[in-house]
Image (spheres, rainbow, N blue to C red):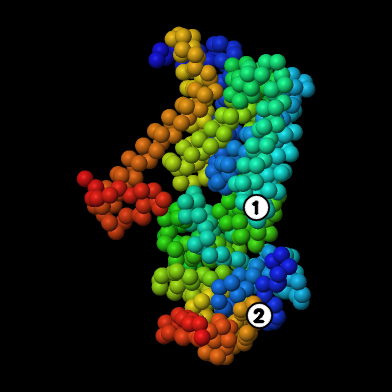
Amino acid sequence: MDTTLLLEPFRVPYLTRALIELTILGVLCGTVGAFVALRRLEFVADALTHTVFPGVAIGFALQGADGVFEGALIAAGITACVLTLLTRNRRTSDDAALAIVLTAMFSIGVIVVSRSHSYAADLQTFLFGQILYTSRTQIVETAVVAVLCLAVLAALGRELFLRSFDVEAARAAGHRVGALDLALNLVIALTVVAAVRTIGTALVLALLVVPAAIGRTLGGRLGTIVTIGVGSAVLCGYFGLIISYTASIDHDVALPTGPTVVLTLVAAYLLALVAAGLVRRRGLRASAHAPAAGMPAPSGLPRPTGSPR
Amino acid sequence: MAYDRTPALSRVDGRVPAGQAVALVGPNGGGKSTLIKAVLGLVPVVAGAVTVAGRRPAAARALVGYVPQAADLDPEFPVTARQVVLMGRYRLIGRLRRPGRRDRAAADEALALVGLADRANTRFGALSGGQRQRVLLARALSAQPPILVLDEPFNGVDAVSQEALIDALARAKAAGTAVLVSTHDLAVAQRLCEQTCLVNRRQFAFTRTESALTSELLCACYGGQVLELDAGRLVVTPG
């Protein structure tokens, strides 16, 4: 790859705006994603991406492109509250309740969109976003949402950490678990809203889940997970943008930007898995030489069979 | 005390004095955990009163250090032993401040009390079951609460960790802490606890440990024939 290509986003205005937007989203999603992973809320995050969809569709139907953000915001606020209540009810299976809400809301969205004349085009826009059409206003809105969400996480981070690790102890210590859950669900919902126009409802989940998964694969502490998550989200946003641009402009291969960013993230995740595997092998080999100093291998990961070569 | 209006435990009466330990003994599902949750203010009390240091349990949470069962926690969670212990000081630290030198010192001191000073930076999940249980006790101790409540801390714990737990609890008692601990281990109850409360849906005894742990009372409480082995383990056969 030509090195001047790496600077292309800084010369072409619409690429610059896309890059700024992706960078803000990378910081936001990398951080929020770490808390999603701690609480194992991936399915809740998935439900939120689907329930924001009808908000987007209704907003668009009522006010055109300007209504998308407001529609998503309202839908996200409502569903964050509903999901918090649903997941509190211990007698319903959480997953079933979520799946019902998720599919119902998604269907409403599809019905609303199907009434428009440009059905297929609109549906594609909502599902996969339009990174290259990022406007200045959109960047400002995303930045405001990001600052708000990161401020909430900064204030409640420790309590959310305790609640994720040991909910009974959090309750016993007097932390308000219901309020903490609602706060985190609202933060996830707002993150989905911020990302939805850029990367679409179908792909937001990747930004929330994959960077944190990379962080968890490579790091053992929350701080490291957030740092690696943010770093990988921002870098993959950048490289995904350049790859899709180069493929489309120089090689005449139409690579939509959103999915390219997602695939870049997934590739980074696979690399992280390989790297972590190599490190563990080396650790095992070292501990085979000095068994007394050896640490137990992390459980849940397959141990290599036979003796290390 | 009740879940969803079905009383889980009734007619319990007794008190845990400062500087003493009370063992909570009884079969699984007999209400030990419910009683503990009532003391923590997490389940409603239908009739009578549970008071903690003269207050409603929910108003006395700052005075109680709670030690849950380590086995219930996710061993994959990305947290070190010291970070777990620091969680015990979150309420003292407050929302907007970062843990300071005093908090870290208190955490390290608590880890030393349970004999794990050298494992502070080890990931929680990489510790043995007994060591995890000791870290959770250190978390409760780090805030120096006047009352400690422990939910079956000796379950599945190796001998070294059991001694470390008993030692740390004995020291806490000597410093004036009141201890309420549920356990299946009668030998531990005999060594550590001045009093024992036998419960199975209702109270069968709340008295001095040697008077409570008789085969007649144990048999009545467990609803069967009870064999007590040398190690203090309890074997119940339906009779």
User: Which dot marks residue B80?
Assistant: none
- Which quadrant of the structure image shows residue B196? bottom right
Residue A291: image x %, image y %? Answer: 27, 56
Q: Say which residue label 1 marks.
A: A92
The amino acid at mark 2 is Arg
**What is the secondary structure assignment of the residue under circle 2?**
strand
Q: CA distance from mark 2 to mark 1?
A: 30 Å
Callout in the foreground (2, 1): 1
- Say if B56 sits above or below A59 in the image: below
Q: Residue at x 30, y 48 (%)?
A: A304
Other-residue count near label 2 (Cα within 10 Å), few / some / many at <14 / 14–19 / ≥20: some
- Say if A65 sits above or below B205 in the image: above
Residue B234: image x %, image y %? Answer: 47, 81
- Which quadrant of the structure image shows residue B213? bottom right
User: Which dot marks residue B202?
Assistant: 2
Do tag 2 and tag 1 residues touch (Cβ < 8 Å)? no
What chain does mark 1 sit on? A
The front one of A138 and A109 is A109
The amino acid at mark 1 is Thr
Q: Residue at x 52, y 58 (%)?
A: B73
Q: Residue at x 56, y 69 (%)?
A: B151
What chain does mark 2 sit on? B
